[in-house]
Image (cartoon, rainbow, N blue to C red):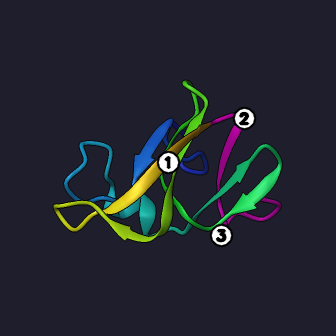
Amino acid sequence: MTADTPPDRLSVDPDSPYYDADVLARDVGIRFKGVEKNNVEEYCVSEGWIRVAVGASKDRYGNPLTLKITGKVEPYFKDVAGG
């Protein structure tokens, strides 16, 4: 991973092993199948999927319910020119 390349997998859940506050502080953007997504909870580039929140529903632990969708994932840092 270079300084201007987001990690292969990232989650916004602090309890996840893929959570990284320093990376999230840089404002990561996600293009999924060529469309900009704002509601991504977690993504994995190598496996080709994202998890998106499903409405305002919560599970029994208070976490958002998510739906796993497969396709081409393109993460980028919004602070990098041409990102």
Q: Amino acid at mark 3?
A: Asp
Task: Point out residue 50 in the picture as x, y percentages from the top left corner.
Answer: 55, 44
- 78 sits left or right of 36 in the view: left
- The structure residue drawn at horizontal position 65% and vertical position 69%, both measured from the top left corner, is 79
Question: Residue at image x 65%, y 53%?
Answer: 76
**Amino acid at pointer 1:** Leu
Q: Residue at x 19, y 54 (%)?
A: 15
SS for dot 2: loop
**At numbered mark 3, what does the secondary structure look like: helix, strand or loop?**
loop
Distance from Cα at disc 2 to Cα at disc 1: 16 Å
Pointer 1 local density, CA inside 10 Å: few below 14, some 14–19, many at least 20 = few
Q: Is residue 60 left or right of residue 79?
A: left
Is residue 36 rendered magenta in the image?
Answer: no
Q: Nearer the viewer, mark 2 or mark 1?
A: 1
Q: Amino acid at mark 2?
A: Lys
Q: Position of residue 7 (x, y in %)?
A: 49, 41
Is 81 within the magenta?
A: yes
**Residue designated by label 3:** 79
N-terminal-most mark, 2 or 1? 1
Gap between marks 3 and 1, in whole Å? 28 Å
The Cα–Cα distance between marks 3 and 2, rounded to whole angstroms, is 22 Å
Circle 1 residue: 67
Q: Residue at x 58, y 33 (%)?
A: 45
Q: Quadrant of residue 47?
A: top right
- Frontmost of labels 3 and 1 is 1
Q: In which quadrant is the C terminus drawn?
A: bottom right
Of the pair 1 and 63, the residue shown nearer to us: 63
Residue range highlighted in magenta: 70-83
Within 10 Å of the Cα at label 3, are there few (<14), some (14-19), or many (20+) other Cα atoms?
few
Q: Give the residue at mark 2.
A: 72
Foreground pick, 40 / 46 = 40
* First of labels 3, 2 by sequence position: 2
